[in-house]
Every structure is written in C-alpha cells, then in structure tokens.
Amino acid sequence: MAHLISRKKPAYPISDYLRSYLERYGRIYDGGIRYDDLLRYNNAIPFYDEQGRDTLWSTVFYPELEQKEIHDRLRLTYALLKADGDFSIADHLYIDRIDLCLYGNTSPFRVRIVNALNDNFDYFYVKRVDANRIYGLELEHILSPNRINYFVWGDTIIEEHIIGIPGDDFLKDHMPTNRFDQVRLAKEFVKFNERCFVRLLGDMHAGNFVIDGTPDLEKWHYRIRPIDFDQQSHHWRKEVYLPECFPQNAPFVELVAEYLPEETIIQYQKEERALIANRMRVSHGRFQALMEVMQEDLIAPEENVRRLGAQLAEHYGDARFERCLTMGELVWCSTQIVLERSRPASVAFYLRAVMGHP
C-alpha cells in the first residue's frame, strides 16, 4: 500500500508571530553564513560512500578568492550553534568539506568541520527557511524524547547533525538478528509511529529518519529520530503521517506483526501518548506558546486542512477536527485528545502485515 508524496511542497515564510516566538526561545541569531552564500560554488563532484555507492550528495568547491571568507563564516556559524557565539571554540577547527543535496526538498548543504588537534569531526546543515520545518523542529524538541539544536538567521536555518544510521542503510546492513533486539526495535517503531501521528509529522519513510543504537548490557536499545521535517502538517492524507504505511518501512512493520501481540502494541501506544502528554504538561508554557502561533499560521492549502480534518474526525470520532481552519488547529486538537484520553493510531495494519496473520 503506497502513500507517496508526488510533488515537492512550497516553502512557507516565517510569520512575524513565529519569528517573535523564535526570538523568545533563543532560536534567532544575527551572523554566520547565509544559504545564498553557499550557492557561489563554481564546481561540484558526486560524493560516494565507503562502499562506492552514490550518496546523491555532491561535494562543492568555491573560487580561491572566496573560499577563506566562506570557511571563516562557517566556523563562526558553528560557534553560534554550539557555543552561543564564543568564537574561541573555533580556533582549531577547519572546514573539511561542503556537500549539497539536490534531491532534497530544501536542497540542503552539509558542512563537515574538523578539529585539527585530534582529527575529530562534526557536521551541521545550512538550509532555506520553511515554516513547516520550523514547526516540525519545535514540536520534535518539545514533544519527543529528543532535543533539537538549530537557529534561524534571516532566510537561513542552521541545524545540528542528528546522530544515527539512516533508516534505509540500517535495513540493508544493520538489522538485528537476535529475537530480543528485534522485539526492542519493533517496540521503538510503534512508539515512533505514534509520535509522528500525534503531532502530524509526515513523510517518515526510511530515508527520512535515523536509528540510534545504544548498547544495553548484552543487548541494544534503539531510538528512531526524524531528520526531515519539511512535511510537518502539510499533506491532506492521514496515512502520510503514519510511518507504518510507507512501503520502505515494511521490514519494521513486519517485525511488529511478528513479535508484538495486539495487546502489547496497544500498551506501547498508550505509553507513548502518556509520555507526550507529560511533556506538554512540563513544557513551562512553551508548547502553549507554539500552538498559539501555529494555529494562526497558514502552512498548507485550505483544501488540505479540510480533507485531513475530515479523516481525523472519522478516525477519532471527534467532530472538532472538522471545524479546524488551519493545520495548527488540527495539531492542537490531536494533542488535546492525547491529554484527554488515549486512542492508538492503529493496530490492524500491523496484524495484516505478515501473510497468514489474522
């Protein structure tokens, strides 16, 4: 069952109210690199991974007279991102590589920065501003177990690298082989699916999230983290907000169907919804402030809001969704239901995933 997004969404500007929210919570800086500065490259070559596979990224190069200025501004940008602008941390850092992803919705740049004293390296990203993405980053920061570090300067977003193995690479090379780890991975996918559905984060196929594995005694603990937030609350189809519905994620769904009985799936869904509700309660007003802005913002066509609202009203049996006029209002209704009662996103899909399962 394929639920693919067939076309790129337009980028939505940051409203004055959203910019005020970002300033209030320290997400705005003046300085560093701008996205348009990195478009001044004069050459590019494909970037291949260690196995010689095309990554769909290209390494870009700059004219000699401009390279030093660009690299210095990138080092300043890293200092703003990591140390609130304390440039002394960048004394021993140099820019090793700048890559461009042309197939992405926002054509992001990825910067590899290296510590000359120990050869340790880090990445950060330079992207065009898009209000959907900003709301996605903020909702991830508030409602998920993960913290998100980024800032906005003008029409540019600077994002910290999110550590983990890309989901599609994980499926090819890192799927666990023992039952206990498979059960843990299945559990995390159920919880990830629930987080995405509650806050309406779309397009979470295996290429748009990473899996962070942590050793836990003899076994592993897994966490799935989204890395692409462009489809936060934009598409009209409910299934776009359910990672279980993407064909690329079928191996994860099959693990759930094989190892988790229905009552266990429901248990994990309720657990995750309870955690989300608690994060809202302890956000010290930040979630409320974000929702006040998001409910007024236009980040999707009116038709998308109407059609998605009708589907969510049917799913939850709650007519409030049909009265929503913006995507932010839909997110607000969804989260209020989490606070009021627990209703899992779905169970039947998992149970049908393996042939012969009732």
Image (tube, rainbow, N blue to C red):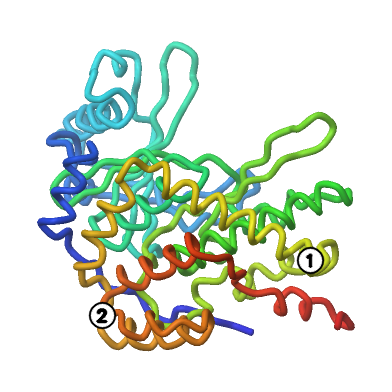
Q: Quadrant of the N terminus?
A: bottom right
**Disc number for residue 325:** 2
Crowd around label 1: few <14 · some 14–19 · many ≥20 (10 Å): few
What whole-number distance in Å separates the C-alpha atoms at marks 1 and 2?
36 Å
Q: Identity of the amino acid at label 1?
A: Glu
Q: Identity of the amino acid at label 2?
A: Leu
Crowd around label 2: few <14 · some 14–19 · many ≥20 (10 Å): some
At x 51%, y 59%, the residue is 208
State whether residue 1 is above or below residue 144: below
**Disc number for residue 45:** none
**Disc number for residue 263:** 1
Nearer to the camera, 338 or 232: 338
SS for callout 2: loop
At x 38%, y 65%, the residue is 232
At x 45%, y 84%, the residue is 313
Left or right position of 2 against 354: left
- Residue 21, given in percent of the width and then of the height, sits at 19, 48
Nearer to the camera, 128 or 355: 355
State whether residue 22 is above or below residue 339: above
Q: Quadrant of the C terminus?
A: bottom right
- Residue 34, given in percent of the width and then of the height, sits at 18, 44
Left or right position of 112 against 195: left
- Residue 294, given in percent of the width and then of the height, sits at 25, 63
SS for callout 1: helix
At x 63%, y 71%, the residue is 244
Left or right position of 64 against 254: left
Left or right position of 227 against 343: left
Nearer to the camera, 27 or 64: 27
